[in-house]
């Protein structure tokens, strides 16, 4: 269907808008691309003043580490395969794993399984496959660009960065699960009531969300430090100290994130006609059955969008995790600072870059998997509310 002539943009306006968009994407993506290139180079190449040396890595290639045309082809095939598997099969896995029709919880489980599978494949299975083609098939197997996985091996296995990844996964899964469980119920109730009390609850939640994170951490800190004494009358000597444990971070991040989750989910529920609730009640459903069996299947794109924002809050948090977790339970974002807390060398800096790329990669994977749900969820939330 062609655009009516009256609505067509002039060529100069299309050229200017597309050019500005391309320039903005270039500016936004260049730092991520550059640190990704640096993470596969030796320190001499990574911090070279010559950009071509950073890209092609002559010193890295002379050391026997390089990327051939076969490696590039396998890498591109892996990227396409990961994208297609995520786009086609994660939704089916989520529907199969969903307990009692809780589609959003099935998506959480499916996303966690998918991310862990991708990390294991890229970090454990793929390197031996690439090493098997080194020097094979003549010129196609000869390195043309210097590249090494040494920094990633040192970060993930030498420095046990996989533990930080598991801690991040535990914290984000807990925050997303609790935030969506409470947020869907609260958002639905607030969207279906016309009470003035609901309005003031939303205003109070918004004010609470606007408080600095340091204020909330300061308020919770004495409770977590003294949690063993507080819980001892009920749990006896088995009462745990929550300070330094992931449960403390989950509690604080849920408290910070919950008002935003309720606001966002309420706007999505407002876009769903109340006639669906009335039709379900006429068919004999209770209020909760109408919510679970009729509203939630329509609502799941908005739930996934809200869950992604909750995930980003917990996944990218630095202040709360660095203050409440000890070194054994540290998540990935604050763990990077450990590379700069000692006498820093160029090798430590490149490893820190490799750790930063490792943190960024799962975010791209999730966005690729959930891109359709994100777009449909944001569109639904913009209709009303």
Image: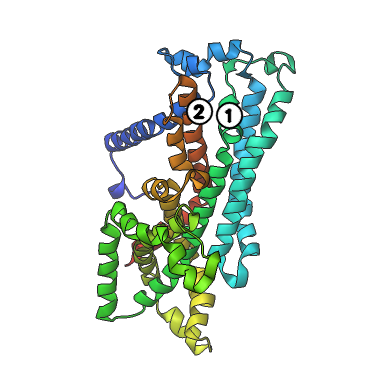
Numbered-mark total? 2
For the C terminus, the quadrant is: bottom left
Residue occupying the point 42% across, 30% down? 340
Rendering coords of residue 89 (x, y %): 64, 53
In space, the residues marked 1 and 2 are separated at their CA atoms by 8 Å
What residue is at 67 percent from the left and 33 percent from the top? 126
Q: Secondary structure at mark 2?
A: helix
Give above or below for 25 relative to 268. Answer: above
Of marks 1 and 2, which one's residue comes earlier in the chain?
1
Question: Closest to the observer: 4 or 333?
Answer: 333
Which residue is denoted by mark 1 in the rendering? 154
The x, y position of residue 219, in whole percent, is 31, 59
Instruction: Name the residue located 34 percent from the left edge and 50 percent from the top edge.
Output: 4
From what the image shows, is residue 142 above or below residue 248? above
Where does residue 329 sit, x and y in percent of width and height? Answer: 51, 47
Asked whether residue 172 is in view, the answer is no
Residue 64's disc is none
Q: Which mark is residue 351?
A: 2
- Do the residues bearing badges 1 and 2 touch, measured as CB atoms within 8 Å? yes
**Mark 1 falls on what kind of element?**
helix
227, 352: nearer the viewer = 227
Q: Is residue 363 above or below residue 37?
A: below
The image shows residue 202, relative to residue 367, as above or below, that is below
């Amino acid at each position: 269907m062609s655009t009516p002539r009256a609505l067509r943009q002039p060529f100069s306006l299309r050229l200017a808008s597309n050019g500005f968009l391309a320039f903005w994407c270039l500016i936004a993506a260049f730092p991520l691309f550059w640190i990704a290139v640096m993470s596969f180079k030796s320190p001499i190449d990574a911090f070279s003043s010559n950009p071509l040396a950073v890209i092609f890595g002559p010193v890295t290639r002379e050391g026997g580490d390089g990327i051939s045309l076969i490696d590039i082809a396998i890498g591109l095939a892996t990227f396409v395969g990961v994208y297609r598997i995520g786009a086609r099969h994660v939704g089916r896995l989520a529907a199969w794993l969903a307990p009692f029709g809780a589609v959003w919880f099935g998506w959480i489980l499916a996303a966690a399984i998918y991310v862990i599978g991708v990390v294991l494949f890229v970090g454990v299975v793929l390197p031996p496959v690439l090493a098997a083609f080194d020097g094979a098939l003549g010129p196609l197997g000869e390195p043309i660009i210097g590249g090494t996985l040494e920094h990633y091996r040192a970060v993930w296995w030498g420095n046990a960065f996989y533990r930080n990844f598991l801690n991040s996964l535990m914290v984000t899964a807990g925050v997303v699960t609790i935030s969506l469980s409470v947020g869907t119920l609260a958002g639905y109730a607030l969207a279906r009531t016309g009470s003035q009390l609901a309005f003031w609850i939303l205003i109070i939640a918004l004010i609470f969300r606007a408080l600095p994170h340091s204020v909330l951490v300061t308020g919770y800190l004495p409770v977590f430090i003294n949690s063993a004494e507080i819980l001892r009358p009920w749990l006896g000597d088995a009462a745990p100290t929550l300070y330094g444990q992931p449960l403390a971070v989950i509690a604080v991040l849920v408290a910070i994130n919950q008002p935003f989750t309720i606001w966002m989910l309420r706007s999505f529920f407002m876009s769903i006609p109340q006639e669906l609730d009335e039709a379900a009640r006429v068919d004999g459903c209770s209020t909760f059955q109408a919510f679970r069996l009729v509203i939630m299947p329509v609502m799941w794109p908005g739930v996934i969008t809200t869950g992604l924002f909750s995930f980003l809050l917990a996944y990218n948090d630095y202040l709360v995790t660095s203050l409440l977790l000890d070194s054994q339970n540290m998540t990935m974002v604050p763990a990077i600072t450990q590379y700069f807390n000692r006498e820093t060398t160029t090798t430590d800096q490149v490893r820190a870059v490799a750790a930063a790329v490792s943190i960024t990669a799962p975010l791209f994977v999730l966005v690729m998997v959930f891109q359709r749900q994100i777009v449909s969820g944001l569109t639904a939330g913009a209709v009303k509310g």
